[in-house]
Image (cartoon, grey):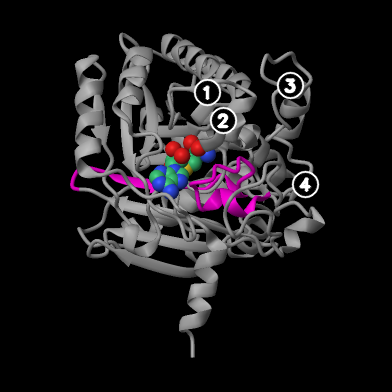
Amino acid sequence: MQEDLFNSERSGVSPSSSRAPDPLSQAEPGRPAEPVPLALAGRRRDSASRTGARPPRHLADLPLAQRREVVAGLGQPPFRASQLSRHFFGRYTDRPEEMSDLPRAARDPLAQALLPRLLTAERELSCDAGTTRKTLWRTFDGALVESVLMRYPDRVTMCVSSQAGCGMACPFCATGQAGLTRNLSTAEIVAQVVAGARALAGGEVPGGPGRVSNVVFMGMGEPLANYAAVIAAVRRLTDPVPAGMGISRRSVTVSTVGLVPAIARLAAERLSVTLAVSLHAPDDELRDTLVPVNRRWQVAEVLAAAWDYAAATGRRVSIEYALIRDINDQAWRADLLGSRLAGQLAHVNLIPLNPTPGSKWTASRPAAQREFVRRLEAHGVPVTVRDTRGREIDGACGQLAASALVSAAHEQSP
Ligand code: SAH
């Protein structure tokens, strides 16, 4: 599990490890190791998950062979595992009454053993004429996570959470302010995508019935800090039915603050998913503040890991850069970024900052943004500016903070 990954790697030699307290410490979920200059910093989440109970086992946690073993243990023929899996991954249902190919008496025991309901929709918000939908989910133990479905003319992207909260404490990110509650299980991650697929297949999203074509791990959490569960989720999402959902690997993006050993490990998995690295500054001095884990793995190491990933997979790495007015949007930083990326298999995705409640930071001025783009292009670096879908429903990047949403919902109820 990821604790093992970190414990073993934390003891490894790191040139930056003496510069600051370890921002990766997950021993105290809910408390960023660094002071964070925002109102919510250090606040504890009240969640039953603090008891440490594990989410119930679900077929999406298991490879198909293990699902067969569970089914056999219930005295059923092993092929029932495939039938059950087809219902979940192909028809997006976990309801026994919809499984007419299973003997009536077997449906409930099988569903109880392998298809427990993991996520309950607490609240649903939509904008962009219904084509952007954010769902707030409550887990079995009361933790809150969010996912966002975004329908475009040519694709449907699900943005999923990999953790309840996040321990990385980036000061401009809403999720980072409240700290980490817990890792999600593989099935809790997969269930977010299946729920989106069900809504699309059922014609609930304007534009007619559709399919989920892309998955981005850009919701709550640091996916590479929940490594084992995330990798298994990628396998479930991309293995063909009935083993998984059959989404193309190339259409899956894993976004990270830059956990260097985990990037190397991901490269070795040969999963050929797209890697996104949240850089946000080309220099260590500023990145130490914006992405505190930089004190552990600095810009040069993170970029070296990214280029190794590109070499191992042949996949272009996406460099995420939230443009923050007068903080990281200076022309010289554009030039420094351009010179560090020039000639690499990379492109820059500029994200106009979504200001979080209480933050003193805001998005760059249009002229600064244009100049930033121009200078990157002058270095021959491909660059796009991300659209800011979902802003009105706090569903845009960096805006996922379930606790804030719940209190807003409560204020509105009579
Ligand atoms: N932990 C992962 C996934 C986080 S969210 C990571 O850091 O990559 C996905 C992206 O949204 C990251 O690049 C993150 O830095 C960015 N982001 C977070 N808060 C933001 C904000 N307020 N405005 C714009 N982008 C933000």
**Residue 215 visible at all:** yes
Q: Residue at x 61, y 59 (%)?
A: 40
First in sequence: mark 3 vs mark 2? 3
Q: Is residue 189 left or right of residue 384?
A: right
**Identity, as a three-letter code, of the amino acid under mark 1:** Asp
Question: Judging from the image, what secondary structure is the residue with disc 4 in?
Answer: loop
Disc 3 crowd rating (10 Å Cα; few below 14, some 14-19, many 20+) is few
Residue 288 - label:
2
* Label 4, label 3: how far apart the Cα atoms are: 20 Å
Residue 264, placed above or below residue 198: above
Residue 18 - label:
3
Determine if the magenta segment contains residue 175: yes
Residue 408 - label:
none
Quadrant into which the N terminus falls: top right
Q: Nearest to the eye among marks 2 and 4: give it.
A: 2
Image marks 4 and 3: residues in contact by CB distance under 8 Å: no
Q: Residue at x 47, y 22 (%)?
A: 283
Q: Magenta stretch?
A: 153-181
Q: Residue at x 76, y 45 (%)?
A: 73
